[in-house]
Image: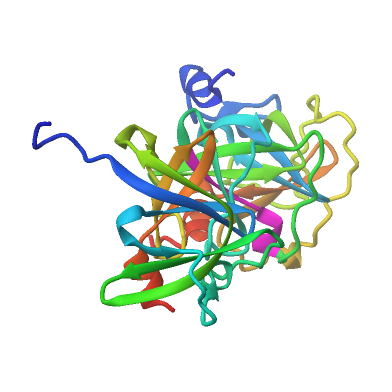
Amino acid sequence: MTDLRELVEAAGGERPAPTAAGAATTPCVGLRTGGRWFALEAATIGEVVALPPITRVPAAGSHVLGVAMLRSRLVPIVDLDRMLTGIATPRSERGRVAIVRAAALELGVVATETRGLLELPVADGAGAGDGTDDGAAGPEGASGASGASGGEREGVPWIAREVQHAAILYAVIDAPALVRAALGVAR
Amino acid sequence: MSADTPPRVPVLCFGASGLRFAVPVAAVAALDAAAPAAVSLAALLGLEPHAAATRTVTVTGGDRARALVVDAPLLLRVLDVGDVVPAPVALPRNPAVLGFARIDDELVQLLDTERLLAAS
């Protein structure tokens, strides 16, 4: 499978690209967990793989589903919905795991489905419902349902901001903060 | 064998709550001994009990010994350094879980009996 991170870095890494409207964007990958959509900067994603067998680990925390063997190494697998609400992300045949690398750590995030690449506005000037939908070809089958209230996400340190794109509200994840929060690592 | 060669360690593998674990054979005092005071390994690790054919394994650690109820099958294997899979950095886990190994195409969690019994 193509290493998405290498691909993105070869294409210029995190350099924002101007849109037709002049707003800078960054490539992201969309993750749906049940009814919620999240987005991670593509540069933080090593790869996206089909849901692998997961081995539970005693006392790992309810949001840590366990570890999975990927390319001869073990990766912790976490459930974002459990981190947010305590309710598990539904499993599906299209289930995927996005491997996130940040803060010198690595973890897998379970997703019901993934979509990418999305060109989402960079942090400056971006925000929920700020009309930043650039009208670019978005995820097919976009429901328009955000699935979670902004209030639910308030105070969650690993959610950097919310961005509306192609009729979907994405909670953009701060990857280093997510990895640290999921694994209980201090900054 | 050179002094730098990592040791090969005989281990006893067994189950608990649908997972596979292993302890060094050197830390096993008895198998299937009658032990009314045996405790469930699953409970000791904070896991849900899992219906399975059970066995009793008495393990030692430090100056303690304890009979543990585990799930069959019990398998004896010799662990080579190449079988060990490094644990992910910062993986939250029970301190008794030392690490992981690939044994018979299964991921097995290696238990430190001293830490396990210290927590019991």
Q: Is residue A117 above or below residue A180?
A: above
Write the start and end of the magenta stretch as one range.
Answer: A74-84
Q: Is residue B85 visible?
A: no
Does residue B11 appear to the left or right of A17 in the view shown? left
Camera-nearest residue between A49 and A3: A49
Screen quadrant of the C terminus of chain B:
bottom left
Q: Where is residue A103 in the image (x, y as percent from the top left)?
A: 40, 47
Residue A80 part of the magenta-drawn span: yes
Q: Is residue B37 above or below residue A108?
A: below
Q: Position of residue A54 (x, y in %)?
A: 62, 44
Residue drawn at x 68%, y 36% as measured from the top left: A51
Q: Position of residue A99 (x, y in %)?
A: 56, 37
Q: How is the image coloured?
A: rainbow
Residue A174 part of the magenta-drawn span: no
Does residue B85 appear to the left or right of B45 in the view shown? left
Q: In this view, does A18 lie above or below A112?
A: above
Exactly how many numbered labels are in the figure?
0
| Quarter of the view holding residue B43 | bottom right
Q: Where is residue A153 in the image (x, y as percent from the top left)?
A: 69, 63
Residue drawn at x 82%, y 43% as measured from the top left: A168
Q: Residue furthest left?
A: B3
Screen quadrant of the N terminus of chain B:
top left
Camera-nearest residue between A46 and A17: A46
Q: Which residue lies furthest to the bottom in this view?
A: B37
Q: Can residue B116 be seen in this view?
A: yes
| Quarter of the view holding residue A48 | top right
